Amino acid sequence: MCFNDVMMSDSSGDLLNRLLSALQVLPGVGPRSAQRMALHLLQHDRQGGKVLAEVLQQAIERVGHCETCRNLTTETRCSICSNPERDQALVCVVESPADVMALEQAGVFTGCYFVLLGRLSPLDGIGPDNLGLDLLGKRLADGGVRELIIATNTSVEGEATAHYLQQLAQPYQLKISRLAQGVPLGGELEYVDRSTLALSFNNRAPV
């Protein structure tokens, strides 16, 4: 009999069952992984569990989106957009905050970002309005962008999003480039190693 079965048969275990269910909202965490995490926290690291719960609650309550680039931040503008040393005229469009983290860790980009928080997917009901493209269009129309770097992933949806971004940017007569060499077809930026990502970024091709 597994831990879950024992808990389900005991009304006093309702809170433990809720903990197991709550842990499974995380990507890649199934019943077994949730059980292992819960047992570790309760048996070996209750203080760590308290810290985790406190920080998670603060993050949920305080972390929002940058009004300029839509990246995650606790401020009105994120640390990248508000950094005077970053090139505000060089804008890289990515799908998620994870992609921003990957590029920042690679250390090859000194401009700013625009985070779509997704990609075009009509079957899932995700259109341009869901990706904040009206905000990006306004940013381009203001005339302060010199180059738009499209760094969407190379999935079918990512390519469709890249094409839409090209069409959006073309009227503003700015340089449009796309990450090229090094990123495999169907690859996700957050899983690409640092050297490959740097090669892709430095060898981006105009479109």
Image (cartoon, rainbow, N blue to C red):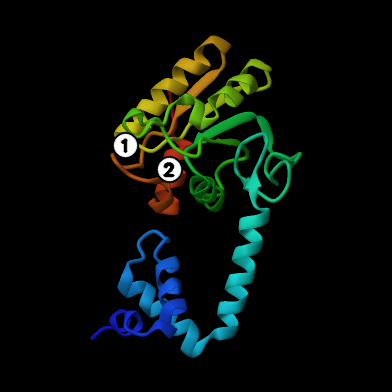
Going by the numbered disc 1, the residue's amino acid type is Ser
Q: Is residue 170 above or below residue 179?
A: above
The quadrant in which the N terminus is found is bottom left
Q: Furthest residue to the left?
A: 1
Query: Extreme bottom residue here?
Result: 43
**Earlier sequence position, callout 2 versus callout 1:** 1
Please say whether residue 201 is visible from this viewpoint: yes
Comparing 180 with 83, the one in front is 83
Question: Which mark lies nearer to you, 2 or 1?
Answer: 1
Q: Amino acid at mark 2?
A: Leu
Specify the label residue 24 is tagged with. Answer: none
**Quadrant location of the C terminus?**
top left
Query: Residue 159, percent across and down?
Result: 35, 29
Q: Which mark, residue 199?
A: 2
Q: Say whether residue 43 is left or right of residue 10.
A: right
Q: Residue at x 63, y 20 (%)?
A: 138
Question: Which residue corresponds to the image point at 54% horizontal and 10% vertical from the top-left?
Answer: 171
